[in-house]
Image (cartoon, coloured by chain):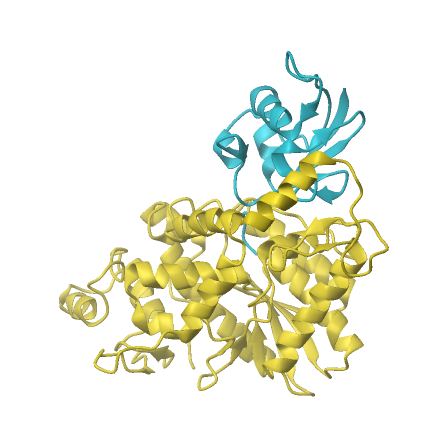
Chain colours: A yellow, B cyan
Amino acid sequence: MALERAAAATATATPRATRLCTICGERRAALKRPKTFQQTCKECFYEVFENEIHRTIVDNHLFNPGERIAIGASGGKDSTVLAYVLSELNRRHNYGLDLFLLSVDEGITGYRDDSLETVKRNEIQYGLPLKVVSYKDLYGWTMDEIVKLIGLKNNCTFCGVFRRQALDRGAALLKVDKLITGHNADDIAETVLLNILRGDIARLGRCTLITTGEDGPIPRCKPFKYTYEKEIVIYPLHSHLLLKLVLNLLCIYSPNAYRGFAREFIKDLERMRPRAILDIIKSGEDFRISSCTKMPEQGNCERCGYISSQKWCKACVLLEGLNRGLPKIGIGRTTGLHDINKMKSTAKILQSKHRETLDF
Amino acid sequence: MHLTLEFGGGLELLCKSVKIHEVNVDPPEKETRLTMKHLLSWVHTNLIDERPEMFMKGDTVRPGVLVLVNDCDWELSGQLDTVLEEKDAVVFISTLHGG
């Protein structure tokens, strides 16, 4: 901290003096990396940013040559930068990968339609084939319809669960070997915190893994695991080639999402001590569950066959609730079997809006 | 002095959806220099139309908002103590949105 104060003092003493990049020593410094406190110029920043991601990919053996990879593309900043950088690195370092863009249309008017336009632009700009899967086709419900029914509380629970399966479904249709997402260091630090706040030990053990689901249908990786959100935003800023991000504010249906509180906290922490983000991830990685803690066992959903630790997977529970006009089912602590029994003893099934069963 | 202010990442929604603002700001009374601290307060009063908590927290920007002065991270020029000069360009970008 003393160093910081000294640096700040020098800064105020000569406020407009041009500082040189600490890497090349030639060009004017344009930013200060929160991760390393390095003051770098634009060009060196691009290099360092791209190289770190390359190293993450190589050191963690994320890919094998010849693999088909789907990039979960929402049109947001993380997935757009991910698509761009991965294309670049694939070319530059000859990863030998076949890349695809996979997008999920949740049916959120005014939010998702904008970002889908961005993904369609990316398809053309980067030359990556795009597949879009929609909640309407998969589940018979759009988020607009769901929110109309249940309001702005717990709607993120539906969306999160549905999106996960939608991505798997899309990845299966594309016949890819792996799915990658743009989750960044800030996201993962938030998730570690969220799981602690909720006492979700099972998720806590998994959420810092850079590759998950290797025993399931489609493994997923997060190449941006150690990449700071701030850097992802800065990367395309200086009129860098093909990237022009359309940055929208948070999803219109998410104001009450619990994650918002964790995010706020992480942002405050980052301001005071930027390394906190990486350190939280490290803590998450090194957690060990006490051997006497009972962990949920992984099985398969009775209805659709998807991975589940309960008799029915969360998506099936939620869908059944929606279709029977009992949308509270699956929300909160008493979930799964309890609710299914409740549903089974309830009267006849209301008109179902199901369009397609999920077969895994 | 004349300054060009740009709002991005959704922040433009807080100032009538206008991204670029050409403004004239003078240093406060009894002060000879205009610092970012003064500018923020000025923006808060004169430009932000709604939801000021998305832009500012206390006397600085809300965590998650990037500030660039003439294309340089304001962390390099002293953050709130950054001194502004005639024709400077300041960019505010919110990083708080989905990815």
Q: Dividing the image into 4 quarters, which one contains the C terminus of chain A?
A: bottom left
Viewer-closest of A237 and A157? A237
**Percent from the top left, x then y, of residue B75?**
65, 44
In the image: residue A130, left or right of residue A270:
right
**Percent from the top left, x then y, of residue A357?**
40, 74
In the image: residue A1, left or right of residue A356:
right
Q: Is residue B13 visible?
A: yes
Which residue is the extreme one toward the left?
A345
Point 22% across, 79% down: residue: A294
The vertical placement of B26 against A80, above or below, is above
**Percent from the top left, x then y, of residue A151?**
34, 45
Residue B28 occupies quadrant: top right
Point 19% across, 65% down: residue: A348
**Percent from the top left, x then y, of residue A324?**
26, 60
In the image: residue B68, left or right of residue A270:
right
Total number of numbered labels?
0
Viewer-closest of A112 and A182? A182
Viewer-closest of A352 and A286? A286
The vertical placement of A223 against A330, above or below, is below
Which residue is the extreme one toward the right?
A26
Residue A196 occupies quadrant: bottom left
Point 53% across, 58% down: residue: A275
Point 55% across, 24% down: residue: B49
Q: Is residue A241 visible?
A: no
